[in-house]
Each structure stands twice: as structure tokens, then as C-alpha cells.
């Protein structure tokens, strides 16, 4: 689980989705602004007060503004502005040739319809969407983890089966060698003709070939397990030795009960539930966009002006020139065709999301029924394979007694040996098939990680 590359990729996706929450919350962070400008202009006077005909008025201005703004989760916008300006003019209408002017203002504005809702869902909708997206990625990580667990277990049992098949082939080869030695003694004793030696040697050659094929199968299945585990390449030459033998513990399950469990635990259904929540937010936002934009607010300000900057600040501090204003802004699209169409489209997407979930429940129901049926069938196959192996063992023992008494042949003994090896392998295959079917049922019901004591924990990186 720690080394699998697919899990590593999903972990990064979870981190990205979690960081999306901080990105969305950035809309409510305070913003600091600073601006400055300098300008100079010469122009002829247009009045006698400015200087009369032919007089050139020179005006120089220097302004800088410091602002602080923040949007609250209620949709309220706060703005604090500190404006400073210095102007120099040769016009006769100026109060002083040099004037410094400072203005401090506070503005509070609040949307009433569009962009606002009493439960604060609409002004916080981007954050809520980001939180849903983060939960969805965590569910996707659970999906990927369950897939890795199932593939790992399947690959593990494939290695067990390959090793067991190799052991069976070794024993089959040993039995063929013993049978060949026995045939030599029988020929030397005059009980068999030399032609019977061909059948025994042919059987031994076949067993050696099967042993080589079983050895190759071990390498192939081990490599598949190494890939799932993402082992370093310098460890791929080390053999894999399974430590948990397959055990058959029969279980009974009802498809109806398993469906209820799957609806509660399947991460895929949890994802679709999150999609429904996200789509409900989109419908809510589309309905809100149909409303007029009405903002109310108030602005309070203090102004200070003097021939020097300290004097302007002193007048500002004394609040000699206060002022305030109340405003109402309204924007409305009477026809509202675009917003109405957008709301209808979002509702259609919401219906699609609901139908998609219903379809997924049907798919889960089918998967659960298939998994329950497969587990039940695998259990029956284990019982039948055990009986087949017991009978094959008895048949071989009886045939060997017949051979010793001269009433059988090497060919028939080899057949019974092959039947026993096939029966032993079939029994193991049935047990492993049951193990895989049980894991598939756990995954179909969403309980595979829980049963394997695996918890999904993602620590946000700083």
C-alpha cells in the first residue's frame, strides 16, 4: 500500500483537492493595495482669477493611496482607504500654492439578493464545493486502495498456486522416477517385457517438462506481485516466499443483506452522493443568479487639508471635516433568459446525477449478486475437489498394488498419478478461488479495507 505507484498518485490528487479548500478560502482573505502617481501639466488660464490672459498655469500633483479590503463569509465587503495627495499650482484660484490633502474612508457594502442567502450557502459556495471535491478525492483514494488490495491478494494467491503446482510436479517427477526404477526391477525379474520401459521413460520425460513449465510460472506470477508491490528493481531477484497458507473457512451470505452493506460502505456510491450535493449547490447558485443584484452600503470619511502634510494629518485626526453617505446599487435583467436557461440546465444535470446514482446502485446490486453467487459456487467446488482428490489417491494406491501383482501397466499407473496431481491442484485452485471470491465480495460490499484493517489517512502537507 505504501509503495504502490497508483496509491502514490491518488495521494497527490487528495493533497491537491485539499489545497483547493485553502484556495477557495482565499476569497475571504484581506487584500492590501498600494497605488501612487505623479503628474505635471501646463495650460493657459481660462479665467481672470487664474491669472488673466497669457498666463500659463502649471499644476503638479502627487497622489498615493493605501487600501485594505476584505470579503466576509456573509457576503459583506469591507474597504478601508487612506488617500493622500499633494498639489502645487500657479493658478490664482488655489487656496495655497501648495496643498496637502488626506482622506480616510471606510465603506461597508452588503448584497441583499444575488450573492447572498440567509444560511450563508451562496456566499460560501466555492468553499463548500472545494470541501466536497476534497471528500470525493478521499473516496477515490479508497477506491484505488481497495483495487490495490484485491490485486495484491490475487497476485499473492497466484504465487502460492504456482509454488504448489511446482511442488506437485516435483512429487510427480519423483513418482515417475520411482516407477521407472520399479519397472527396471520388474524387467530384470522377468515380470515385464523390455518394451514396458518406453512408457515409464516417456512419463518421466513428460513430468520433467511439466516441472520446467511450473518453474517458469513461478517467475511470472512473482513478477506480477513484485509490480503491484512496486519493489525496487534490485530486489526483484530475491524469491518471494508466501507465509500465509490458504485455508478454507466456508461462509454464507445473502445478496439482500450484502446490498444494504454495500450501499453504506461502497466509496463509489459515496462519490455519487457527493456529486449530488455538489449539483444541489450548483442549482442553488443558478437560482440565486436569477435575482436582481441589490447592494446597500455606507461610507464614512474624514478629510484633512493644509499647506503641509503634518497639518493635513493633524486636521484629519481632529475630525474637522467628517462626512458619510448611504448608497443603494441595483442591477437587474428583466428578461433573464440566460440565467433562467442556466438554472434549467443545472436542474437537468441534477436529474442526471440522481439517475446516475440509481444506475450505480443497480450495478452494485448486480456485482453483489455475482459475488455472492461466485462465493457459493467456489465453496461447492472446494467440497467437490476434496472428494475428487480423495478418490484419486485411492485409485492410485489400488493401481500400484495391481502393478506389483502384474495385473496393470506403467501406462495406467501414470494415468492415475496424473489424475492425483490434477486432483490435488484442482483442490488448491478451488480453495484459492474461494479466497479470491471472498475478497471480491468484500470489495463489492465496500468492506475490503475494513476487513484488512486498512485505514485511509492523508496528512495535509504544509
Image (cartoon, grey):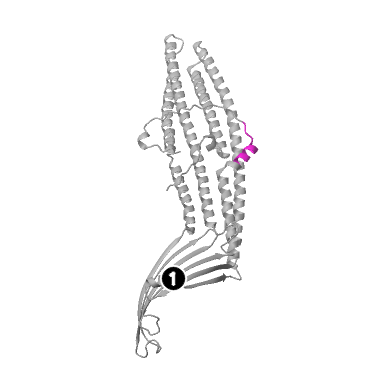
Residue 334 percent location from the top left of the image: 61, 71
Residue 180 percent location from the top left of the image: 43, 16
Does 103 sit above or below residue 246? below
Q: Provide the residue designation for mark 1.
A: 316
User: Would you say 126 lies left or right of 462 here?
Assistant: right
Does 336 sit above or below residue 165? below
> Which of the pair 173/130 is nearer the observer?
130
Range of magenta residues: 252-262
Residue 167 percent location from the top left of the image: 45, 24
Residue 132 within the magenta-colored segment of the rendering: no
Q: Residue at point 57% right, 27% down?
A: 249
Q: Residue 442: in sight, yes or no?
A: yes
Q: Which secondary structure, mark 1?
A: helix
Residue 401 percent location from the top left of the image: 52, 12
**Which of the 4 quarters of the picture holds residue 280?**
bottom right
> Which of the pair 229/180 is nearer the observer?
229
Amino acid at each position: 500500500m505504501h509503495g504502490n505507484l497508483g496509491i502514490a498518485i491518488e495521494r497527490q490528487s487528495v493533497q491537491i483537492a485539499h489545497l483547493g479548500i485553502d484556495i477557495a478560502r482565499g476569497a475571504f482573505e484581506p487584500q492590501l493595495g498600494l497605488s501612487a502617481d505623479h503628474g505635471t501639466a501646463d495650460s493657459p488660464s481660462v479665467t481672470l482669477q487664474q491669472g488673466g490672459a497669457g498666463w500659463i498655469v502649471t499644476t503638479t500633483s502627487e497622489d498615493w493611496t493605501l487600501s485594505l479590503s476584505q470579503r466576509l463569509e456573509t457576503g459583506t465587503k469591507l474597504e478601508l482607504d487612506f488617500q493622500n495627495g499633494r498639489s502645487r499650482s500657479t493658478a490664482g484660484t488655489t487656496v495655497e500654492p501648495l496643498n496637502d490633502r488626506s482622506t480616510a474612508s471606510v465603506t461597508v457594502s452588503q448584497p441583499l439578493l444575488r450573492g447572498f442567502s440567509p444560511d450563508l450557502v451562496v456566499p460560501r459556495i466555492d468553499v463548500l464545493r472545494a470541501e466536497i471535491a476534497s471528500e470525493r478525492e478521499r473516496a477515490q483514494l479508497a477506491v484505488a486502495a481497495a483495487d490495490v488490495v484485491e490485486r495484491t491478494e490475487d497476485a499473492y494467491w497466484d504465487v502460492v498456486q504456482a509454488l504448489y503446482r511446482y511442488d506437485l510436479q516435483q512429487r510427480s517427477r519423483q513418482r515417475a522416477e520411482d516407477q521407472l526404477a520399479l519397472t527396471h526391477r520388474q524387467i530384470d525379474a522377468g515380470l515385464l517385457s523390455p518394451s514396458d520401459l518406453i512408457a515409464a521413460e516417456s512419463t518421466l520425460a513428460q513430468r520433467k517438462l511439466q516441472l520446467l513449465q511450473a518453474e517458469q510460472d513461478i517467475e511470472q506470477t512473482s513478477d506480477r506481485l513484485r509490480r503491484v508491490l512496486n519493489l525496487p528493481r534490485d530486489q526483484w531477484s530475491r524469491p518471494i516466499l508466501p507465509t500465509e497458507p490458504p485455508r478454507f473457512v466456508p461462509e454464507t451470505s445473502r445478496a439482500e443483506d450484502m446490498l444494504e452493506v454495500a450501499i453504506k460502505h461502497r466509496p463509489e456510491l459515496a462519490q455519487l452522493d457527493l456529486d449530488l450535493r455538489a449539483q444541489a449547490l450548483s442549482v442553488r447558485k443558478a437560482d440565486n443568479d436569477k435575482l436582481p443584484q441589490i447592494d446597500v452600503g455606507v461610507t464614512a470619511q474624514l478629510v484633512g487639508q493644509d499647506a503641509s502634510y503634518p497639518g493635513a494629518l493633524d486636521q484629519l485626526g481632529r475630525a474637522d471635516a467628517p462626512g458619510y453617505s448611504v448608497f443603494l446599487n441595483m442591477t437587474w435583467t428583466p428578461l433573464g433568459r440566460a440565467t433562467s436557461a442556466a438554472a434549467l440546465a443545472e436542474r437537468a444535470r441534477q436529474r442526471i446525477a440522481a439517475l446516475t446514482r440509481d444506475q450505480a446502485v443497480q450495478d452494485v446490486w448486480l456485482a453483489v449478486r455475482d459475488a455472492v453467487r461466485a462465493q457459493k459456487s467456489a465453496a461447492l467446488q472446494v467440497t467437490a475437489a476434496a472428494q475428487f482428490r480423495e478418490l484419486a489417491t485411492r485409485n492410485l494406491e489400488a493401481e500400484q498394488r495391481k502393478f506389483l501383482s502384474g495385473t496393470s501397466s506403467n501406462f495406467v499407473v501414470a494415468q492415475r498419478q496424473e489424475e492425483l496431481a490434477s486432483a490435488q491442484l484442482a483442490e488448491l485452485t478451488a480453495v484459492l478461488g474461494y479466497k479470491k471470491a471472498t475478497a471480491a465480495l468484500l470489495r463489492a460490499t465496500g468492506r475490503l479495507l475494513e476487513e484488512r484493517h486498512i485505514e485511509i489517512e492523508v496528512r495535509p502537507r504544509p
